[in-house]
Image (cartoon, rainbow, N blue to C red):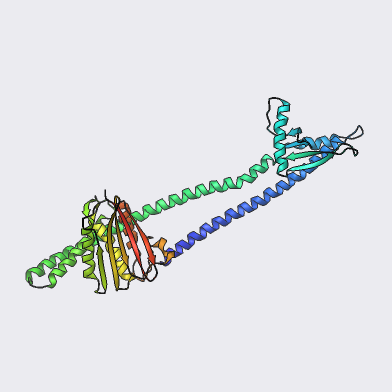
Amino acid sequence: MQWTDRIRQVKIFLVAAAVIVAVVSLVVSHFLVRDLYMEEHKKMEVWAEAMRSLNSADENTDISLVLKVINDNQTIPVVVMDEAGDAQFFRNMDVRGKTYEDSLRHAAAIGRNLKASGKFVRIEVGDTAQEAYQYICYDDSVMLKRLSSWPYIQLGVVMIFVVIAIFALLTSKRAEQNKVWVGLSKETAHQLGTPISSLMAWTEILRENYPEDELIPEMDKDVKRLQLIADRFSKIGSLPEPVPTSLNEVLDHVVDYMNHRTSSQVTMVKDFPDADVQVPLNASLFEWVIENLCKNAVDAMEGAGTITLRLEEVGNKAVIKVSDTGKGIRKKDLSNVFRPGFTTKKRGWGLGLSLAKRIVEEYHDGQILVESSELGKGTTFRIELKKK
């Protein structure tokens, strides 16, 4: 559990670092855009002043500097409007009308929108006897718009690459885990094969020499159990062909096994329908799943309590529920119970539920989940299998 928590903390740290980098990037871009916007606003104030000087110029006014200021604006879209809202002049705008007057009408519509959004400078025109006003309405330059949107585009591209990288890493990790599963299982089955064969031979010798001994049949059962375990391990990594099997019988076998392997303080309760529920599955592997859930239940109950196995049909699915009266699972651990290496027990590798999930979902196209869990009251696991 400690190493899985450490890996989880590293992942959280990396995600937090990525979020911080993204936020810092957006904040810096925001300040850059704000500074550029303020600079453009000041330029428009100077441009508006040049327009006011041009409108009030007489024959003694040197307008060369004024015209230079006006003509130097090659980037900021601007519309000059009168008090009535009609456009008198526009610049740096892609306004294409059939005639110049039509273009002015389109520019006036754009100018009114800019004025409504507060992007304008008002200047006085005419003599002092009859004051009039013009409105210099301006939009953000193409450069400013690109700079405003670029951080989001950049973050979007980065996020796409991050998602692709994470997906590739997860796929690679899953493939590597599959290889580890298969290799470990095959090696375990291989290593068990030789001592099991030897034990079977010794059991036969003992049976011939002591035919009346009551312990020999029990020893034979244990050897056959070891042989079954080795057979299960040998099937991990391959796709065993499922065959129609009675779930009632499979669960009965598990109950019989658990009754012989647990204390009298553990009560096994069966809640099965009268009719057999037929499901295509590999009985040997699926029994392993139910046994694993029952053994975990015994550990959660600390050797005393009730385990209930329910079997029911819901539509085209068979549903198995394994409930216990144990200590339950903490809410923060519910999302980790099927994670390889996660365990709340002092002993164990934390691989049982992970293997159970693999058998149910990959080998039987089913689903396994924690249906409910309450601290101090118990846990219920739910398995769904398709009947066809």
Q: Does 308 sit above or below residue 24?
A: below
Q: Residue furthest toward the right?
A: 60
* Relative image position of residue 207 (x, y in whole percent): 9, 69
| Residue at 33% across, 68% down | 348
Is 206 on the left or on the right of 261, as rendered?
left
Residue 23 visible: yes
Residue 80 found in image quarter: top right
Q: Residue furthest toward the front?
A: 274
Residue 92 visible: no
Front one among 109 and 340: 109
All told, the count of numbered labels is 0
* Relative image position of residue 166 (x, y in whole percent): 46, 52
Quadrant where the N terminus sits is bottom left
* Relative image position of residue 34 (x, y in whole percent): 69, 49
Front one among 358 and 233: 358
Front one among 202 and 31: 31
| Residue at 23% across, 63% down | 254
Residue 308 found in image quarter: bottom left
Is 163 on the left or on the right of 70, as rendered?
left
| Residue at 41% across, 63% down | 334
* Relative image position of residue 86 (x, y in whole percent): 76, 33
Q: Residue furthest toward the top?
A: 99
| Residue at 47% across, 48% down | 164
Residue 182 found in image quarter: bottom left
Is 2 on the left or on the right of 87, as rendered?
left
Is 368 on the left or on the right of 167, as rendered?
left
Q: Does 297 sit above or below residue 236?
A: below
